[in-house]
Image (spheres, rainbow, N blue to C red):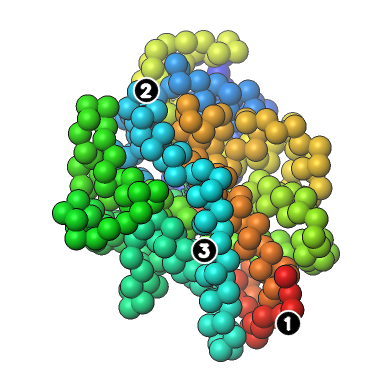
Amino acid sequence: NEQTPQEHTLDNSLALLKDGYDFIFKRRREMDTDIFQTRLLGQKAICIGGKEAAELFYDTTKFKRSGAIPKRIQKSLFGVDAIQTLDGDAHRHRKMLFMSLMSRERLDVFMQLLAEEWEAAAGRWERLEELELFGESQELLYRAACRWAGVPVEEETARQRADDMGDMVEAFGAVGPRHAAGRRARRRIEDWLEGYILDLRAGEFKVPEDTAAYAMAFHRDLQDRELDARMAAIELINIVRPIVAIGRYVVFGAIALHEHPAYRAKLAADESKYRQWFVQETRRYYPFTPFLGASVIHDFTWQGHEFEEGTMVLLDIYGTTHDPKLWDEPDAFKPERFEHWGGSPFDLIPQGGGDHRGGHRCAGEWLTIDAMAVSLEYLANRLEYEVPAQDLGLSLSRMPALPESRFVMRSVRRKQGAG
Ligand code: HEM
């Protein structure tokens, strides 16, 4: 592979932890390239970024996911052998199950539940002097997610369960205690929901057929078998956990509103276009997924670069959403840019690219966008609050990114007559 820029290091895993979201992007800038070769976790890796790279990465004839996702990520973030690791017909069949939960009607039901939970949370917050939006929004999203998914919410455990869901996400870019906490959280939640799936199958509880709990409990695979109860629990977690993770975007939206207060009035106005643009810009601008990994199925050549069978390939998600070739002033927060966005499936890729049904693109992207719009409407229009001095800076070397203060709010009040 003489054509491909290479880093001559024994292994770059430590640099990856240090550079975090900027690991691939920084090297792309330094070498002025959209492709380079390095070594990570003891093996050769090709890193790619940009729109054409994203198009390549989502070609399922060239890349597969089985064997591409490290076990430590599966044991914390995703669940072992879950949908993220499937390929071909098995993947398409499982993905249909997830997408069947995302009809317009079912999304509207979620948004109604979410609005109720915002209202209930605001009532609780009015009695507090001060609160952290991150934990609070994860909890209210957890409550809405469970009600929507057919999972019982117990008052005594709700906050702990919500924190457990959040800790699985917190684990992904960490080594040491933060990673270990995510694994423990996953074990607790899998144990609990595996029991629940077995109870559903035994008829001890009844849930509506259009819920995720029902779908996972009674789904049949291509061989017409039920999912193993543990796997059904893992896939149910693949619905609830990422809904809870929208709390990170709620915090990012709150930071953006705080730093660009002129948008408050625009978001509150009847016109919804600003809400859409603001949501898209929040997803583009703030760091969440750093990169994605896949493995080369057969040797092929792309733009003169050789990809050998079995090579690990990483797609630069953060760098693609900040690529100056794709975004004018990429490091400025400018929702209006979306007035002229062409809607390509390969440039705005914070939740993956390509096609939702045929590939691995996030099953919950539409739900995320709508849930952020509902949440921003609350923050901008229905609530009054103070933002005391605190450190809201985001470090690109902390994966996943989160402000140290987790967004402290003070003296929260519901506005009279809002909405
Ligand atoms: C996959 C991001 C919310 C369910 C993904 C992928 C990313 C992502 C980057 C991987 C795409 C790929 O592998 O090519 C996010 C972000 C979210 C979010 C940043 C914001 C909180 C959600 C929600 C749900 C969800 C709310 C469900 C309700 C899934 C599932 C997959 C997935 C099931 C696996 C899809 C597959 O492998 O085919 N998400 N997601 N996500 N997401 Fe999300």
* Residue 280 image point, x, y percent: 68, 47
- Disc 1 marks a residue whose amino acid type is Gln
Query: Residue shown at 60%/38% (left/top)?
Result: 349
- Disc 2 marks a residue whose amino acid type is Gly
- Disc 3 marks a residue whose amino acid type is Leu
* Residue 157 image point, x, y percent: 33, 73
Q: Name the residue under label 1.
A: 416
Of 122 and 209, the residue lying toward us:
209
Label ID, residue 403: none
Of 268 and 69, the residue lying toward us:
268
Give the Cα distance between marks 3 and 2: 35 Å
Of 329 and 346, the residue lying toward us:
346
Q: In this view, does 226 lie above or below 151?
A: above
Q: Name the residue under label 3.
A: 113
* Residue 249 image point, x, y percent: 59, 57
Q: Residues within 10 Å of mark 3 (few under 14, many from 20)?
A: many
